[in-house]
Amino acid sequence: MKGITVPHDVAVAAVGGEVAPLIEHIRVALGESVSDSDIDVVWGCWLDTFGHLHKKRTPKLTQKKRKIIRSRLRMFTAQELCDVIKYVITDDFWMGKNDRSTAYYFIDNIFLNDDRVEKLLLKVDDASEDISLIEELKRNIRLLSHKAKVDALDLKEKNTYVKLIKRTEELSGQSYDYRNHRWIDA
C-alpha cells in the first residue's frame, strides 16, 4: 500500500470532526475521486424512483443537483446514496404525509448534509427487509398481470393476484391501477 501524506489543514479539519475532507483527500491520493459516472448512477436512481411523480416534465440534472450529489459522494458510495433514495419513497413523512403535507424527496432535501444521509442510512438498515419484500411482491404481481393479459387466470391464481396486490398496497402505501397495471401514489 502506498503512503499518503495528509496536508496539515486537512488533518486539523479531521481532528475537529470534519472527516469529509480527509476521506476526499485519501480517495484522490488512491485515484478514487468522485466520478461523473457515480453522479449519473445516483441521479439515475433518483429519477427511476421519483421521476414518475413529475408528470408534466422530466426533472433535469442541474449543476446545483450535481454539486450536492458530488459532495455526498465524497463521504458515501453511490450504492449507499441509492439505498437512501429507495428508503425515502417508502417513508410517509418524506413523501408528504406529514403535518405540513409537504414532500421532501428532492435531492437537496435528501442529501442536505452528511449527517442527514447517515441518519437515513441507519433507517435503511431497519427497512431493507420491508423494501425487498415490496419489490418481490411487485415483481410477482407484474408476472401475474402479464399472464392475465396473455391468458385468463384461474380462480386460485386470481385470488393470489388480488392478495399480493392488497398486501403490497398495505406495505408500500401505493395503490394498484388494475386497468393500466401500474402503481400510483395513494
Image (cartoon, rainbow, N blue to C red):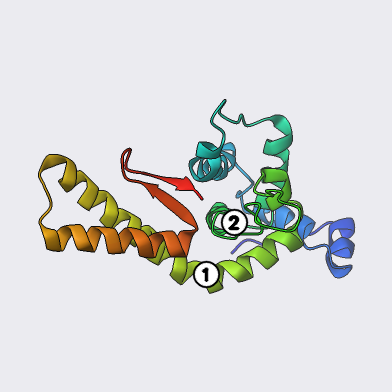
Q: Measured from the top left, where is residue 125 in percent x and y?
A: 54, 71
Check disc 2 and report the residue beneath it.
88
Q: In which quarter of the image is the N terminus?
A: bottom right
Q: What element carries label 1?
A: helix
Q: Which residue is drawn at 13% across and 52% down?
A: 153
Q: Name the residue: 17% across, 46% down.
A: 148
Residue 186, horizontal then vertical, whole percent: 51, 50
Direction from residue 181 to residue 127 in the image, left or right? right
Q: Is 28 situated above or below 120?
A: above
Under tag 2, what secondary structure? helix
Name the one closer to the observer, 45 or 17: 45
Q: Is residue 18 left or right of residue 46?
A: right
Badge 2 or badge 1: first in the primary sequence? 2
Dot 1 corresponds to which residue?
Answer: 127
Q: Position of residue 126 (x, y in %)?
A: 55, 74
Q: What residue type is labelled 2?
A: Val
User: Relative to residue 144, is residue 176 drawn left or right?
Assistant: right
Task: Please name the residue shown 50% across and 38% down the image.
Answer: 52
Q: Is residue 186 visible?
A: yes
